[in-house]
Amino acid sequence: MSQAPRRTVVVLAAGEGKRMKSATPKVLHPLLGRTLVGHVLTASAAAGAEQTIVVVGHKAELVEAHLAEVAPAATPVLQAQQNGTGHAVRLALEAVPEATGTVVVLNGDVPLLRAETVGRLIEAHESGARGATVLAAEVGDPTGLGRIVRDAAGNLERIVEERDAAPEVRAIREINAGIYAFDVASLREALSKLSTDNDQGEEYLTDVFGILASVGHPVGVFVAPDADETLGCNDRAELASLRALLRDRVNEAWMRAGVSILDPATTWIDVTVRLEPDAEIDQNSQLLGETTVAAGAIVGPDTTLIDSTVGAGAVVLRTHSIGAEIGAEATVGPFSFLRPGTRLGRKAKVGGFVETKNAELGEGAKVPHLSYVGDATIGAKANIGAGTIFANYDGVNKSHTTVGEAAFVGSDTVLIAPVEIEPGAYVAAGSAIQKDVPAGSLGVTRAPQRNVENWVTRRRAGTVSAAAAERAIAAKDDGGEVSTAE
């Protein structure tokens, strides 16, 4: 049984991307959960390469730091001066002198490339025992792209950059995608023969095809099944177009896997998100990062989930959630803000205009309205009344509050941490609690109410309030009903 040839991947990521007009290197711009180069590296996994070389240049330190996070096994190679793609690949191969077999070269700004397409390119290249194979695509508008020039028999003759192309070549709509497979030995030989005799004065990797063909090495073309896969990114407008195309691809895949997406045009799902069949995503929602949504859960409309977990059957409505765990059958929203460390148990409820941070709600616990819950543990079936504030910060330290099982906290209450409301205890509405409330007890700090009679008629004479009060007082004195002002 013959051994599969060794493979090396080279990713070209040295360019500045001037048209992006950004302090961020082009290949580090994000696109649905990964950077541009991150998408390319993911697709390259289909090569089954023993080694991956990433050629860096502009702001190399930023690109190298990103590679250390997302592809620590990749080796960065510095191209200090960008003298063309041929120069970049030669530097990459110098870093791996032991490489044999197939080398796959990918541009770092082609984020829609599928792993399956990379695999099929390699298969076509190796099965044909070619010196080189280019990935091509048929496009409606080839402006700005290199053209595939074939001979009379339909075989690849050469690749011509648009800057150097004659009018009849510019009319060709079959373009070079900037993705290649080479025999390493043949590539090394051809790279040594590159010149800078072209419009940009650079070493073009595409010239390798003409060099190899001229000395009898088989060269070939593999046409991408979807031209969108070959689209690169040069400016913010193109980045937005790629983002929309990837959104549609991701949403279609999830819908065909059994997820309901009610308005795909306004739903954005990162490629790192995981959904289960029968989850439902309503309009104007974003699912980002490492978010997961279980079967039967409903998310949206108008919801953003970042690195959050939504349990089976939960409902999350008009909510912004970062790093939260939402348990099965829990309900959240509308207009809720779940911050990191929030953990909601089964059937827990976080209602309208509630903010939570580092807060754990037990099964069936409720914070229905207009509250802030920070650094807190709330037991099962406890109820937190409207307008409650967990005062967790004294200006220096943050402290914890515990509300026990089935405890009841009345509206407009401040729980001043550290404090514990024990199981089954009640807190009267309008209280400021700074001492523990024992189990089964009522905590209350309200001062007795005092009414200052006739204050309005004396201190606000001539106002509509004073007039209404005078009518009410007169009606009481007469034993009749209060009349309304004309």
Image: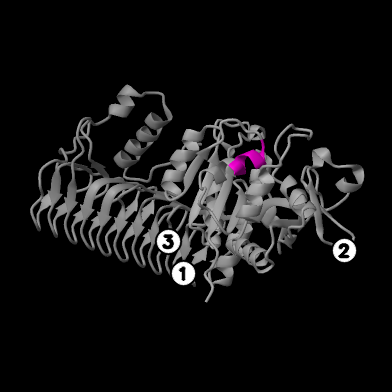
| Residue 449 in sight from this viewpoint | yes
**Numbered disc 3: secondary structure:** strand
Q: Residue drawn 34% across and 57% down?
A: 325
Residue segment shown in magenta: 84-90
Q: Is residue 26 above or below residue 74?
A: above
- Name the foreground residue: 186 vs 299: 186
- Name the foreground residue: 104 vs 42: 104
Q: Is residue 328 above or below residue 428?
A: below
Q: Position of residue 193 (x, y in %)?
A: 71, 42
What amino acid is at disc 2? Ala
Q: Position of residue 110 (x, y in %)?
A: 63, 50
* Magenta stretch: helix, strand or loop mostly: helix
If you read the primary sequence from the N terminus, does the residue marked by circle 3 or circle 2 appear first?
2
Please tell me in which quadrant of the rendered image residue 85 appears.
top right
Q: Position of residue 375 (x, y in %)?
A: 24, 46
Q: Are marks 3 and 2 in contact (CB under 8 Å)?
A: no
What amino acid is at disc 1? Glu
| Residue 28 in sight from this viewpoint | no
Residue 85 magenta-drawn?
A: yes
Q: Residue drawn 67% across and 44% down?
A: 191
If you read the primary sequence from the N terminus, does the residue marked by circle 3 or circle 1 appear first?
1
Lateral position of residue 196 relative to residue 418, left or right = right
Residue 99 magenta-drawn?
A: no
Q: Which residue is mark 1?
A: 276
* Crowdedness near tag 3: few (<14), some (14–19) or many (≥20) residues, C-alpha within 10 Å: many
**Numbered disc 2: secondary structure:** loop
Please tell me in which quadrant of the rendered image residue 345 appears.
bottom left
If you read the primary sequence from the N terminus, does the residue marked by circle 2 or circle 1 appear first?
2
Q: Residue drawn 15% across and 39% down?
A: 448
Q: Which residue is mark 3?
A: 292
Lateral position of residue 480 relative to residue 90, left or right = left
